[in-house]
Image (spheres, helix red, strand yellow):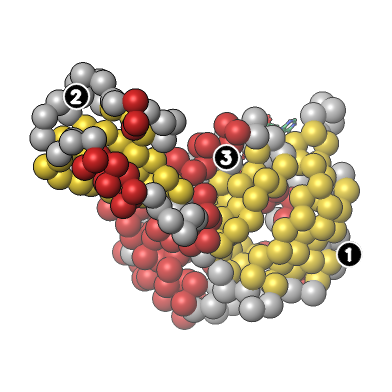
């Protein structure tokens, strides 16, 4: 898959002297959903702002589909749509005018049929004449999406698209993001809902304190850094573990009714059968077993904490 967006050595130091991004190198593949994860203040919005021309990088180069963002800003920017975190529209304007005007801003010829279809897809058609101020929060957010898509960009940035939206709208937005990807739009999103990234993203980038710490296929990341735990529910509670079973990766629950064994999914041998044999050998019988895979959220938290 070819790359549609490349960042090379991107840095940002704000006028305050604060360095928000340090030497960011990143290639986004055509047609992927890329989730950029990071704690508050990590630099996600700064990075998106730089690519979209809202923030000026202190150093580095950005190429969007062979257009240099600095030298060829209009052409490069035309390829990109941005759904910002905050409402950035004139609230006295109608939905129709806002979205239609946005298309014109990028020098695209008017295409009312496309705008109509866009508003219908986003369930905004019956609100097309309403002023933005009269819309619900969820609808306002959909207007931001319509506005970002008005000029038919190939690359769509979504900065916290589902922050503060209800479960139903969040589900609708996921479906819409997937549909856009099927239509060939490359999606880059930031989110604090890590299960959202786990569910949707092809690749994950983790940024912390302005540094891109990791970029990885989601499935590989889950496999390599993922850990599993096996809980063994005992037939009889134990007061303590016998010496033969005392080890770091095995813990007895406080009430003595279960044991938890943690292991890496990357190892060829999980050690589970050996453990069960040891239990049998020690005369410890059990009623049930349960395994659990660590979530992307757990992986993310341990990554950010480890390197903090
Ligand atoms: N205009 C500015 N002037 C000075 N510092 C800024 C400016 N904008 C952002 N920063 C700082 O840069 C850092 C990165 O901010 P940024 O908004 O990019 O983070 P973020 O990862 O998007 O955070 P969040 O998840 O909270 O939205 C923060 O410490 C922030 O205070």
Q: Residue at (21%, 42%) from the top-left corner? A: 280
Pointer 2: what residue? 238
User: In the displayed structure, does residue 39 sit left or right of residue 212?
Assistant: left
Q: Quadrant of residue 130?
A: bottom left
Q: What residue is drawn where x is 61% and y is 47%? A: 206
Q: Quadrant of the C terminus?
A: top right
Quadrant of the drawing holding the N terminus: bottom right
Q: Is mark 3 within 8 Å of ligand 1?
A: no
Sequence-wise, the earlier of marks 1 and 2 is 1
C-alpha gap between disc 1 and disc 2: 70 Å
Q: Is residue 50 left or right of residue 306?
A: right
**Secondary structure found at label 3:** helix
Query: Which percent across, then down, holds residue 37?
Result: 56, 46
Q: CA distance from mark 3 to mark 2?
A: 34 Å
Residue 199: horizontal and vertical position, in percent? 40, 58
Q: Is residue 137 above or below residue 120?
A: above
Instruction: Give the mark, 3 or 1, whose residue is nearer the N terminus.
Output: 1
């Amino acid at each position: 898959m070819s790359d549609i967006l490349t960042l090379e050595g991107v840095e940002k130091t704000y006028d305050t002297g604060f360095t928000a991004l340090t030497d960011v190198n990143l290639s986004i593949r055509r047609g992927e959903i890329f989730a950029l994860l990071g704690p508050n203040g990590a630099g996600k919005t700064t990075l998106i702002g730089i690519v979209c021309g809202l923030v000026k990088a202190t150093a580095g180069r950005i190429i969007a589909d062979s257009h240099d963002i600095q030298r060829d800003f209009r052409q490069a920017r035309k390829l990109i749509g941005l759904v910002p975190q905050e409402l950035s529209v004139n609230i006295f304007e109608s939905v129709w005018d806002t979205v239609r005007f946005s298309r014109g801003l990028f020098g695209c010829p008017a295409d009312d049929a496309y705008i109509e279809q866009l508003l219908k897809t986003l369930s905004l058609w019956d609100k097309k004449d309403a002023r933005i101020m009269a819309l619900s929060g969820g609808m306002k957010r959909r207007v931001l999406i319509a506005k970002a898509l008005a000029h038919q960009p190939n690359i769509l940035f979504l900065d916290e698209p589902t922050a503060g939206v209800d479960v139903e709208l969040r589900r609708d937005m996921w479906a819409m993001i997937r549909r856009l990807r099927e239509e060939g739009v490359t999606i880059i999103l930031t989110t604090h809902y890590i299960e959202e990234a786990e569910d949707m993203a092809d690749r994950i980038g983790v940024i912390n304190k302005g540094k891109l710490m990791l970029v990885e296929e989601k499935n590989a990341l889950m496999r390599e850094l993922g850990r599993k735990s096996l809980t063994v529910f005992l037939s009889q509670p134990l007061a303590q573990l016998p010496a033969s079973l005392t080890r770091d990766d095995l813990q007895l629950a406080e009430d003595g009714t279960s044991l938890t064994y943690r292991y890496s999914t990357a190892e060829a041998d999980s050690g589970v059968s050996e453990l069960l044999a040891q239990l049998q050998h020690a005369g410890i019988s059990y009623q049930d077993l349960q395994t659990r895979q660590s979530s992307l959220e757990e992986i993310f938290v341990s990554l950010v904490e480890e390197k903090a």
